[in-house]
Image (cartoon, rainbow, N blue to C red):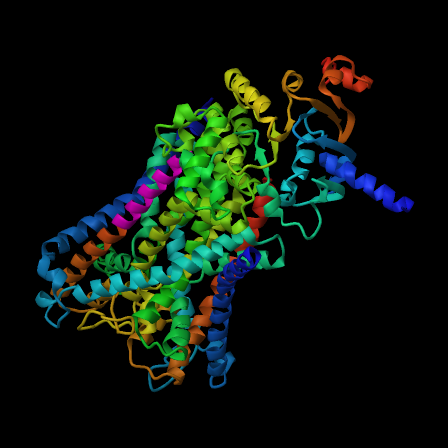
């Protein structure tokens, strides 16, 4: 076997081992370089947290994985983003299909101005699934997974906007779970919520990790240390340190990481 | 200190002047409407509504004109609504920031300011003559549809724009295509605003006279239209016709018809405002 | 499969948007073609300089000046009436009036613009003219004064609403600076606010002018059908728009010279309103940049 073949076999087995991969990724918004050459590998069925001060590229980087940056006007990217070993920026990739396999939860809960049922069923409906019984079962199981079922089961036709902030966010999570994605991206999902709702959602994330790969951007370091397995510290568009959460928060390698963790800046 | 007092007096004087001006237009309008009511309210009875126009003022009625107006309104809606909404969706959700989109924007702004009689001239050449529709309801509706198209487009765009970006984000993040997002999320959410816009546009169309005169709507039509290719008249043209007749009986008829036209116009405006308020509440 | 559907939908939507361009092209083509045909028979010099417009009589004259003077005279009267009133309203609502008053009054004022013009025409002929005749004894039953005043009433909201929006958009810091120096509301309004909002106010005036120049029914009913080159507001005149209506009501042969006159008149009108609208659009765009 030639050296080249050996290398590519090793490379592809590494690719398969990691659910999400970034290779030397650079991002520009117009002239501003938001991400300055980031590489990282994320394993499946783990919770990975991105921490770091505002504006350091965490959300931008997160959105590379479901290509939500495509909608921003001056967005430009170099480098490779792989999911399950495949380059998602390849011309042949159907971006909508990609997004159906990845769920996203936003900072401010954004339920559709429709009923609770229609919210959760939306992802299935746009795939053409119409069978009423199937939809009802999926909606029920998704709402149960986020512990919302008991609170809303009596009136699924109620408007989603009538729910509280915490309930709305759990509804948004249920919405993404309904299509059974393998990856869930969360962009500061609890920063707009009260402590009780936050606690409920953190509990939820911890449970979901068995079935899903979760990446969460958070401003809240305590949250990161509570729920994540690995943590990446972003600063000014670069990853300063990326390691097991335990290590990052008790014995970081880099001085900058320690400074941020201990609150000397941020 | 004399100067300060003078300035204060001027200030107060302007305040009085400002209130006067604000109320002037409304007071004048009330006088006009009061006058019309006095002239015309007694003339309105079921016969007036159901009669055909005639050479004798007492026997004349607005039936054909009323039917013509209804036909025109319905047909104009059918033509203008799909085109206007489609164009607005394109401009708001699909077009990119290039030369074409700026040309489209300037153009629509310009069309909104073209005098309605010019649309009449356009309709006369293109619809009545070249497309050989004759002076029919269809030609009139096509002409008015073009007239109200900019209004429909602008108000639909505003309605779609008002839907928060977070809804679009959520839909795209779930893998919905652009059209799925428009169809399932944006249009239902902006429905109230779109409805308001079209009702306002139609309340304008119901009062339009000049373009329809130019395309050949007759002032004296002895029958109500029964198909889109029939000739027709509309309420404002009937009013215009009666105003130009010397006999006093026709002045009464005109006043009575004006009351009905104003009623229709104000009711439509009222409905539009009602829907706008309900729709705006939805996002609060 | 889905990709094809998306593409087809996008094309259909684009097509609908392009219809708007087709309308403009259509207007320009229709007016130009008939106008060119008209000018093959009537010299453009005559058109622009002959003081008489008598295309329907046996002794034909084709000078647009008299129709133009009718249009401009009635429009001038309308603006002269509406401008001080509309501007005062905008200043009063923006700088003096309590918010609740403003909220109730603004939609009522918009009502003035919603009244069908044929109704205004009736008022001008049946109410305003007889009223004015009581103190202007020489006022003829068709005249540009009544029509002008009523058109002015109609466009009050055009000027007041847009000017008020422009005043409202001026940053509060300017207002506070003026009051901080002890100016009255009047001084602040005229010395600080109006100059700051001037582009928005000018836009509202231009749009109002464009609106009255294109107005048809009020003048067709109340201003008369006698084309006349004059500045006298008490005599009958005829506007460009009223002439087009007059011909349309009559029995004019298609392709006759008389028929083409309405397009010659129409293209003159179109050029005026087009220039005004373009001007207001340019100013509006510049104005937007100013506060961004």
Q: Give yes or no for residue A76 being in the magenta stretch.
A: no
Q: Residue A86: x and y, percent?
A: 71, 44
Residue sitting nearer the eye, A89 or B55? A89
Which residue is found at the position 63% from the left and 50% from the top?
A94
Which residue is found at the position 58% from the left and 40% from the top?
C291
Q: Is residue A44 left or right of residue C117?
A: right
The quarter of the image holding the C terminus of chain B is top left
Most extreme residue toward the front is A1
Residue C105: quadrant of the picture: top left
SS assignment for the magenta stretch, majority: helix
Residue range highlighted in magenta: B267-284
Which residue is found at the position 36% from the left and 54% from the top?
B201
Most extreme residue toward the right is A3
Residue A186: quadrant of the picture: top right
Tell me if I can see residue B220 in this picture.
yes
Residue sitting nearer the eye, C146 or A122? A122
Residue A188 in the image: above or below residue C20: above
Q: Is residue B29 left or right of residue A18?
A: left
Tell me if I can see residue A23 in this picture.
no
Q: Is residue C238 left or right of residue A142?
A: left
Q: Residue C234: x and y, percent?
A: 30, 62
Residue B174 in the image: above or below residue B217: above
């Amino acid at each position: 076997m030639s050296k080249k073949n050996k290398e590519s076999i090793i490379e592809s087995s590494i690719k398969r081992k990691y659910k999400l991969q970034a290779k030397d990724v650079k991002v520009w918004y117009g002239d501003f370089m938001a991400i300055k050459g980031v590489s990282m590998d994320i394993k499946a069925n783990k919770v990975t947290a991105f921490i770091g001060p505002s504006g350091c590229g965490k959300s931008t980087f997160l959105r590379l994985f479901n290509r939500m940056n495509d909608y921003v006007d001056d967005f430009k990217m170099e480098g490779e983003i792989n999911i399950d070993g495949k380059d998602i920026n390849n011309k042949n990739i159907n971006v909508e299909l990609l997004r159906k396999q990845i769920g996203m939860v936003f900072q401010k809960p954004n339920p559709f101005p429709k009923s609770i049922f229609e919210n959760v069923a939306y992802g299935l409906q746009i795939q053409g699934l119409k069978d009423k019984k199937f939809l009802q079962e999926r909606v029920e199981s998704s709402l149960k997974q986020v512990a919302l079922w008991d609170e809303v089961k009596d009136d699924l036709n109620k408007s989603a906007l009538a729910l509280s902030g915490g309930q709305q966010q759990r509804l948004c999570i249920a919405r993404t779970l309904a299509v059974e994605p393998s990856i869930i991206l969360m962009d500061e999902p609890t920063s707009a919520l009260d402590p009780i709702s936050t606690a409920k959602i953190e509990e939820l994330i911890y449970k979901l990790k068995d079935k899903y790969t979760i990446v969460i951007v958070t401003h809240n370091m305590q949250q990161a240390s509570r729920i994540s397995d690995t943590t990446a510290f972003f600063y000014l568009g670069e990853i300063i340190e990326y390691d097991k959460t335990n290590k990052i928060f008790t014995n970081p390698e880099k001085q900058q990481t320690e400074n941020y963790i201990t609150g000397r800046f941020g | 200190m004399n100067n300060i007092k003078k300035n204060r007096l001027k200030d107060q004087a302007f305040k009085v002047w400002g209130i006067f001006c604000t109320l002037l237009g409304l007071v004048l309008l009330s006088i006009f409407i009061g006058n019309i009511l006095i002239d015309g309210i007694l003339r309105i009875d079921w016969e007036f509504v159901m009669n055909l126009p005639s050479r004798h003022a007492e026997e004349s009625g607005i039936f054909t004109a009323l039917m013509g107006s209804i036909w025109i309104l319905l047909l104009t809606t059918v033509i203008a609504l799909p085109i206007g909404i489609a164009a607005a969706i394109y401009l708001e959700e699909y077009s990119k920031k290039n030369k074409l989109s700026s040309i489209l924007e300037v153009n629509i702004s310009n069309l909104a300011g073209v005098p309605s009689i010019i649309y009449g001239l356009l309709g006369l050449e293109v619809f009545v003559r070249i497309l050989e529709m004759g002076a029919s309801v269809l030609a009139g509706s096509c002409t008015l549809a073009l007239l109200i198209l900019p209004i429909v487009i602008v108000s639909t765009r505003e309605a779609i724009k008002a839907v928060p970006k977070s809804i679009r984000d959520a839909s795209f993040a779930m893998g919905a295509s652009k059209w799925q997002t428009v169809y399932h999320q944006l249009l239902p959410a902006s429905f109230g605003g779109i409805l308001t816009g079209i009702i306002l546009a139609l309340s304008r169309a119901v009062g339009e006279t000049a373009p329809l005169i130019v395309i050949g709507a007759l002032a004296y039509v002895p029958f109500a239209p029964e198909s889109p290719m029939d000739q027709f008249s509309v309420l404002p043209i009937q009013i215009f016709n009666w105003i130009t007749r010397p006999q006093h009986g026709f002045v009464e008829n005109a006043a009575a018809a004006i009351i009905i036209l104003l009623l229709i116009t104000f009711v439509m405006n009222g409905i539009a405002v009602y829907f706008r308020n309900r729709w705006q509440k939805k996002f609060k | 499969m889905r990709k094809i559907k998306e593409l087809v939908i996008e094309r259909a939507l684009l097509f609908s948007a392009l219809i708007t361009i087709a309308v403009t092209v259509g207007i320009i083509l229709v007016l130009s073609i008939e106008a060119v045909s008209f000018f093959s028979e009537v010299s453009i010099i005559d058109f622009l300089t002959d003081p008489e417009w008598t295309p329907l009589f046996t002794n034909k004259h084709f000078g647009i000046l008299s129709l133009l003077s009718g249009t401009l005279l009635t429009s001038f009267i309308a603006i002269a009436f509406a401008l001080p009133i509309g501007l005062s309203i905008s200043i009063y609502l923006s700088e003096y009036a309590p918010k609740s008053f403003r909220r109730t009054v603004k939609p009522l004022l918009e009502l003035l613009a919603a009244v069908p013009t044929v109704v205004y025409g009736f008022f001008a002929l049946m109410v305003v003219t007889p009223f004015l005749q009581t103190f202007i004894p020489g006022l003829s039953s068709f005249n540009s004064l009544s029509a002008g005043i009523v058109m002015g009433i109609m466009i009050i909201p055009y000027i007041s609403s847009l000017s008020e929006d422009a005043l409202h958009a001026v940053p509060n810091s300017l207002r506070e600076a003026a009051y901080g120096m002890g100016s009255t509301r009047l001084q602040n309004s005229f010395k600080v606010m109006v100059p700051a909002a001037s582009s928005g106010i000018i836009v509202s005036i231009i749009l109002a002018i464009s609106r009255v120049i294109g107005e048809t029914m009020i003048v067709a009913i109340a201003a008369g059908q006698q084309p006349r080159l004059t500045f006298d507001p008490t005599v009958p005149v005829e506007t460009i728009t009223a002439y087009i209506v007059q011909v349309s009501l009559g029995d004019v042969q298609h392709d006759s010279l008389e028929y083409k006159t309405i397009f010659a008149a129409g293209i003159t009108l179109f050029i005026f309103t087009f220039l005004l609208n373009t001007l207001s659009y340019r100013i509006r765009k510049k104005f937007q940049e100013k506060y961004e």
